[in-house]
Image (cartoon, rainbow, N blue to C red):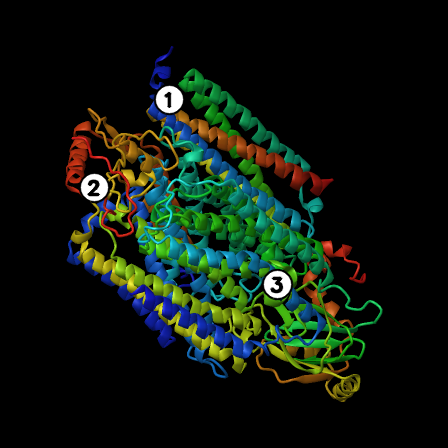
Amino acid sequence: MTAAADTMTVTPQDAQKYEEKEFGFWLYLMSDAIIFACLFATYLVMVGNAAGGPTGKELFSLERAAAETALLLFSSTTFGVAAVALSQGDRSKVLLWLAVTFALGAGFIFLEFGEFAGMIAEGAGPDRSGFLSAFFTLVGTHGLHVSVGLLWILVMIGQVLFKGLTAPVASRVMRLGLFWHFLDIIWVVIFSVVYLPGLL
Amino acid sequence: MRPALAYRSLALALGAALLCAGCSVIDGPVLDPKGPITLAERDLLFQAIGIMMIVIIPVFVMAALFMWRYRGTNKSARYTPNLAYYWPAEVLVWGVPAAIIVWLGLHLWHDTYKYDPYNQIDPSVKPLEVQAIAQDWKWLFVYPEHDVAVVNELAIPVDTPVSITITSDTVMNSLIIPALGGQIYAMAGMQTRLNLLADKPGTFWGRNVQYSGTGFANQQFQTLATSKEDFDAWMEKAKQSSQPLDAATYEKLAKPSEKVPVTYYSGVEPGLFDKIIAKYSHGDVDREPHAAHADSAAEPAE
Amino acid sequence: MDFFGRLTIDSLPFYSAIAASGAGVTVLGALSVMAVITYFGAWRLVLFDWVSSIDHKKIGIMYVMVALVMLMRGFIDAAMMRSQQAIAYNNEGYLPPDHFDQIFSSHGTIMIFFMAMPFLSGLINLIMPQQIGSRDVAFPFMNSISLWLTTAGAGLVLISLVIGKFSTAGWTGYPPYSGSQFTPGVGVDYWLWAVLISGIGSTMSGINFLVTIVKCRAPGMTMFRLPLFTWTVFVTSILMIFAFPALTVACGALMLDRTLGFHFFTNEAGGNMMNYINLFWLWGHPEVYILILPAFGVFSEVVAVFSQKRLFGYISLVLATMAIGILSFTVWLHHFFTMGSSARVNSFFGTMTTIIAVPTGVKVFDWLLTMYRGRIIFKPPMLYTLGFLVTFVIGGLSGVLLALPPIDYLMHNTTFLIAHFHNMIIPGVLFGYLAGYMFWFPKAFGFKLNEWWGAASFWCWIIGFYLAFMPLYVLGLLGMPRRMEHYEIAAWQPHLIVAAIGAFIIFLGIVCLGVQLAVSIRDRNKALDLTGDPWNGRSLEWATSSPAAPYNFAVVPQVQSIDAWWDMRRAASLMSRPAEYEDISIPKNTFIGAVIGGAGFVFGFAMVWYIWWLAILCLAVIFVAIVIRASDDDTDYVMPASEVKKIEDARFAQLAKAPKNEMADDPGFAGQPMPEPST
């Protein structure tokens, strides 16, 4: 095996710690899922409350939403490749694929930011109607999560660069992966609950 | 503190509280109903208290008995330190409360349907329609059939069902006349409904009970339940008022104010109630708080 | 220009004598605490041994300290309301509406979020890891963040008294009244940020406790050998994890409405206030079980220990706890039967609510049956438990009444409701926590609390409770609404005077608690707990020394049964000393948790006052702090076996000198073999 894999061997005590952290992180994700569930419910309650303002049909662009979806789904795949590289202990590959994931995620945020800015410029900002408040908050909360995920990727790139693929770093990358895939799933739901019905 | 002294003072405190309760609760609006709704709700209260005594009294008795008999210093009482399970006891502690809840649940289901405030009290009689509008900090009542409106006073004829549709032109309020029945929220852009009936004449207070700001304590009114003749006379008096409730007058009235004296208006802006709702709803929001009420046969389609 | 947002010199409370004196007391209190620390030269100790500590026991103690301070503040609010209502018949009393409204809002907010929640987290932190034979919680550092975020929230409520005003919208903050149109000042913002920031702390606590229980149990400690207190913590943690997000969303959306002009809950532009109320109670109802279940856990421990008998119906109690946990998510609508829901919806939620009475009733009977054929010793924790048992069923009765929608239509928003939930929360929650406080105090500090003053506090609390709240039931039947700053119905006044007397007697109870603490500290050498097991206890927390060593257990115990310690002691298994000790890895102290909490506090303050640059700065500080911590792979230190041996040798030397059973002198003691420590 490579030298990198050697540094990743863990004592049973450490293994127990990583297991605890992973379980704790799953619980956090469940809790976060409830936040999104409440936001989805709120959106569904308020989707009709356009207060005479623009509705989803007038505001959403299927192309943009599809492009956002593609970027995010693809970034999940590239993260998967990074995770495989991690299990092989290939540091430069891990760095490469984390960087690609970051670029795709940043592209997603760029598109979303453009969408929000365009809507606000048209006078369809979140203060226009209950519907738009719910829309901006739901999609924006997801966007905020992705942004935090991007910062986390940067920190992990830094840790891999400076610390190498040590066991604690590897366990953090794995949890980042859970987070990133979770956001992907949330986005799929947003796409199907917000954009598709809004446009069809 | 000596236990005996403490028990005595506890008993004294309980006694004082009970005495205090006894002397004035009799003529409280809930226990001395003036209409069939409050009467039924009070009876349910008594029944439920009664049935729950099956559990409550044993708890008191067991607590007192065990505390005394199994006090540590009483070495003559039986001591079984490892007794942790006895199946008949488990059956009882689950079974008895469950049986009571089944009984209560059936009553609850039945009475909740029966006394749903949206239900017309007597479908064979056309109820008196009143529209109630909550403002900061007063109540405006509109009699659409009589083209009359009044601030902080509600007159109703005895033995005639009254159907009050309710909305708010401010924050959330809750309308109650405890002698006649329960409350329902008033919310901007939405309409709720309360059906009441007074079977005894009298003057009963009503008010907002949902906290609504600094004038909340003063947001009350009197309900005059009178004979048909007196009600007609009251209506005549109201119609004599020289003041109409047009849009401009309404605007002024709707501004926050407290302790507004009873004011009569003759001639009400047409569709005032619906306009107040529409001002907030933009035609988006379902005007009933819960769409589920569509299945309530009592609610006429609007 | 807008460097300080909307903060100006006019925000100081010089507009009213009462507000200014409240601010004065707050500032003086803070200054005097600092003066005392300086006088004793204790800053080093406070900072390096406590503020930076991530030991679950110290965090637990700090939580309880926060809770007791906030209990005082919350009680002052209560006393002001009771005295105002006692005199305000046909006159304005001494509190203007705007002030009265802030007081009832802060009373509820403080008692739920900053008295009960910290008290609960404190007791859990202190005891739960020891009960399951663990050396710490799963995430000691996150524990510290939770503590300091909760403290940050409490700090925001306190500082609102000095700078600006507090919310007038009640502890539930119903919109649209709590929207910026009707309450434009900073009050509701203080409330929102205090709740949001502490809520994040509570969610993290829930995750921490649950992972600890699931992953960190000692060998042999199967789920169905967990002490009841830990079982209740297990369910409470699940509720925390799944309920708090709803509060975060409700308050977050209201914050967006107020700060950025969103329309979630406004009257206009398509807002929907009913959605807030649903979200709020989707959290709010589980919350009352979050509060009360651990208190049930305390009662379960106390009743078994002081009846000197095994807990009756362990499996029933566990099942009942789980049933309550699940049902708690199915009843939230009973908080607003009167919002116009259909009879079908109301009957469903009413029925679900009454069903909760079944598992709760089971618990009460199982506790009573635990006393049956026991040998009851009436120490203060047991007095609180007995007071609870008798009083709680009255609250249960009124709760079932309110669960019947036709009755709720009459009783909703009246003082009957106030009486009901105080009847649950004072005897149910607070008595449980106070019982736990007196029960586990020796475990935290190594000496027992004075029993006479403990009993005196109990009698004042229970007599005061009956006098203060039974009249409110009656007032509810007389139709008195809650939150009345003055009234014009003469029949109400006598009851309100009795209630005010009750509040005064509760005040005496709080004084007794203070005297008890002072007297106990003065006389601590007479009441030392040398064995670590002052009550002849049953569960594993009594197997450690009092106070427990940093690692709790030098040798992780092997658990054989439900009453693990009771049975071990009989088998003399834990008392045997190992031939040699192991090195133990212990997390190092760190200030990062306190820094995050401090930055959270300043962030909340900046958001309340719209000082945007400061808010961004605080977020940056939090981010950097987290990255620094997350990049530190050297967070533990190793306590060498030699040091462990030194601590354990001292402990066994103390044990050898200690009485064989600290309860043996009690006239009610039923006898329990206490094996000799092997030397």
Q: Please determine if labels 3 and 2 lie on a single subunit.
A: yes
Given residues C34 and C363, the one toward you in this image is C363
Farthest residue, direction top: A1
Residues under numbered marks 2 and 1 in contact, where contact means CB atoms less than 8 Å apart: no
Question: What residue do we see at 59% from left, 53% from top?
Answer: C353
Which numbered disc covers residue A165?
1
Q: Please determine if labels 2 and 1 lie on a single subunit.
A: no
Side of B145 relative to A28 (left or right):
right
* Other residues around mark 2 within 10 Å, as few (<14) / some (14–19) / many (≥20): some
Residue B215, image x, y percentages: 54, 75
Q: Looking at numbered disc 2 in the image, what kind of residue is underneath it? A: Lys
Q: Which image quarter holds the C terminus of chain B?
A: bottom right
Q: Chain of mark 1?
A: A
Farthest residue, direction right: B124
Residue under label 3: C408
The answer to whether residue C164 shows anywhere in this view is no
* Other residues around mark 1 within 10 Å, as few (<14) / some (14–19) / many (≥20): many
Q: Which image quarter holds the N terminus of chain B?
A: bottom left
* Other residues around mark 3 within 10 Å, as few (<14) / some (14–19) / many (≥20): many
Closer to us: mark 2 or mark 1? Answer: 2
Side of C44 relative to B182 (left or right):
left
Residue under label 2: C660
Residue A36, image x, y percentages: 56, 42
Side of B288 relative to A100 (left or right):
right
Residue A161, image x, y percentages: 36, 25
Q: Secondary structure at mark 1?
A: loop
How much space separates mark 1 and mark 3, taking CA atoms?
62 Å
Question: What residue do we see at 41% from left, 35% from top?
Answer: C225
Q: Secondary structure at mark 3?
A: helix
